[in-house]
Image (cartoon, rainbow, N blue to C red):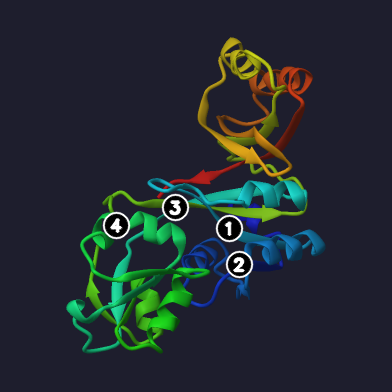
Amino acid sequence: MEELLKRFEKVYCQGIEGAYSHIAARQLFPRLQPIFLKSFEQVCRSVGEDEGSAGILPFENSTAGIVSGIVRLLLKHELYIAAAKEIRIRHVLCAKKGTQLSAVKRVFSHQQALLQCSEYLSRLDAEQTETPNTAVSAKMASREEFSAAICSEEAARIYGLEIIEKNICNSDNNITRFIVIARNFFQSPDADVTSVYFKVKNESGALFKILKVFADHGVNLISLHSLPLEDEPWHYGFYADIEGTLGRPAIAASLEEVREKAQFLRIFGSYCSKRA
């Protein structure tokens, strides 16, 4: 995977310094200075317009699930997944120095972080305010009295906040999978996962027929997620991670058969998924 990532000359990520996307970008692209953008949409658009660039996006959390809208953006901008890396997330609650927990009236954080710390937050008498990312939350908390942020220890340090409490996630095993997106399809020699998206006919047994194809070929689906279609209310598409690469004959054959049976099939990539 490392050799593949050296091909890229730029890396875009959403947020500001100290965001978890920044941490992921630094680990995956230690030689590059990330270019920060305001939204996931801007990251995808920039990668789509710049062939030599990559983007970093948070894709799935072990407790809160898939980050809303990422699959739609990959489809919209016709982008591919070149690599993935799992990062262990250890959120902290932090605020201006000297702030007592009992004085906190508002907590800033990204929607996913709020979900990941919902049990802890249920014990606080504080308003929850969603922000674009956790580092922005830290920056906002540094400017407001009686406010706190849920973010990384690094973000707390960067924005001069004092940590009130550590390890506030619902689960001690809180992991987020970040993906590297690219304009072109790449396959790393050490690939171990193939990701696809498909739509099925709106009829009885349609999904079963697709899943049976994988089963008949002995192909293991690591995960399967249903995603609502924006232009077709109450209809769904499906994102799946397959164990193995396109170089495996059974996977290649099963996807050819799925392409014939499904309304639509898009292969996002066959790549290395680094574990936390």
Left or right? Give the position of 270 relative to 276.
right
Q: Which residue is mark 2?
A: 13
Q: Residue at x 45, y 60 (%)?
A: 111
The Cα–Cα distance between marks 1 and 3, rounded to whole angstroms, is 10 Å
The Cα–Cα distance between marks 2 and 1, rounded to whole angstroms, is 7 Å
The Cα–Cα distance between marks 2 and 3, rounded to whole angstroms, is 15 Å
Q: Helix, strand, or loop for circle 2?
A: strand
* Type of amino acid under label 2: Cys
Mark 2 vs 3, N-terminal side = 2
Q: Residue furthest front?
A: 233
Image depth: mark 4 or mark 2 in front = 4
Mark 4 vs 1, N-terminal side = 1
* Type of amino acid under label 1: Leu
- Numbered circle sitting on residue 176: 3
Mark 4 vs 2, N-terminal side = 2
Q: Residues at badges 2 and 1 in contact (C-beta under 8 Å)?
A: yes
* Type of amino acid under label 4: Cys
Q: Residues within 10 Å of mark 3 (few under 14, many from 20)?
A: many
122 in relation to 210, above or below: below
Q: Helix, strand, or loop for circle 1?
A: strand
The residue nearer to you, when weighing 102 against 5, is 102
Q: Residues at badges 1 and 3 in contact (C-beta under 8 Å)?
A: no
Mark 4 vs 3, N-terminal side = 4
Image depth: mark 4 or mark 1 in front = 4
Q: Residue at x 61, y 54 (%)?
A: 180
- Numbered circle sitting on residue 57: 1
The Cα–Cα distance between marks 4 and 2, rounded to whole angstroms, is 24 Å
Q: Helix, strand, or loop for circle 4?
A: loop
Left or right? Give the position of 138 relative to 121.
right
209 in relation to 124, above or below: above
Q: Image quarter for residue 120?
A: bottom left
Image depth: mark 4 or mark 3 in front = 4
